[in-house]
Image: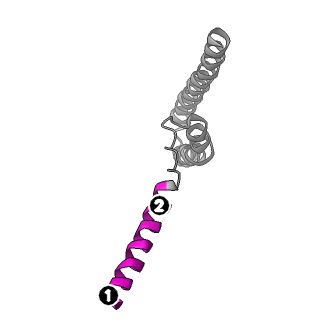
Amino acid sequence: MIAIELMEATSSGVTHALHTLASTPLAEPAPKGIDTNGVVTFFASKIAPILLAVLGVIFIGRASRGEISKVLTSSAIAIVGLAFIAGAATLFFVGDYLIELIFE
């Protein structure tokens, strides 16, 4: 008699648990897009200052050894490189604007 009551209580509990699990809504899947704004912000705030500091240390080291012409050449190359990066970022945002303008 006790075994039957125990089995009924257990099956009732299992049925209740299965009903609860079945009625719980599933979580929505995460978006699959890449957060480009987050990537650009990360590089601008974390990576770029470190690279500029390394370039500064290299330039100061060369200038202290009397290699001013090499420092000026390297500085010009670095400035041109930064201009290309800024131009690419500008084109990225202009392209995004044009796409929104055309397709929306």
The quadrant of the image that shows the N terminus is bottom left
Identify the residue at the far top of this view. 102
Q: Could you say which disc has been placed on residue 3 in the image?
A: 1
Q: Secondary structure at mark 1?
A: helix
Report x, y in % for residue 47. 55, 45
Residue 11 against residue 4 in the figure, above or below:
above
Magenta-colored stretch includes residue 13: yes
Residue beneath the point at 61% across and 26% down: 86
Q: Secondary structure at mark 2?
A: helix
Magenta-colored stretch includes residue 82: no
Q: Could you say which disc has been placed on residue 19 in the image?
A: 2
Report x, y in % for residue 92. 59, 22
Residue 93 quadrant = top right
Residue beneath the point at 51% across and 55% down: 23
The quadrant of the image that shows the C terminus is top right
Front residue of 9/24: it is 9
Which of pointers 1 and 2 indicates the residue nearer the eye? 1
Would you say the magenta stretch is mainly helix, strand or loop?
helix
The three-letter code of the residue at mark 2 reads: His
Q: Tell me the magenta residue range.
A: 1-22
Q: Could you say which disc has been placed on residue 103 in the image?
A: none
- For the residues marked 1 and 2, what is the alpha-carbon distance in whole angstroms? 24 Å
Front residue of 54/18: it is 18
Front residue of 29/23: it is 23
The three-letter code of the residue at mark 1 reads: Ala
Marks 1 & 2, CB-CB < 8 Å contact: no
Residue 95 quadrant = top right
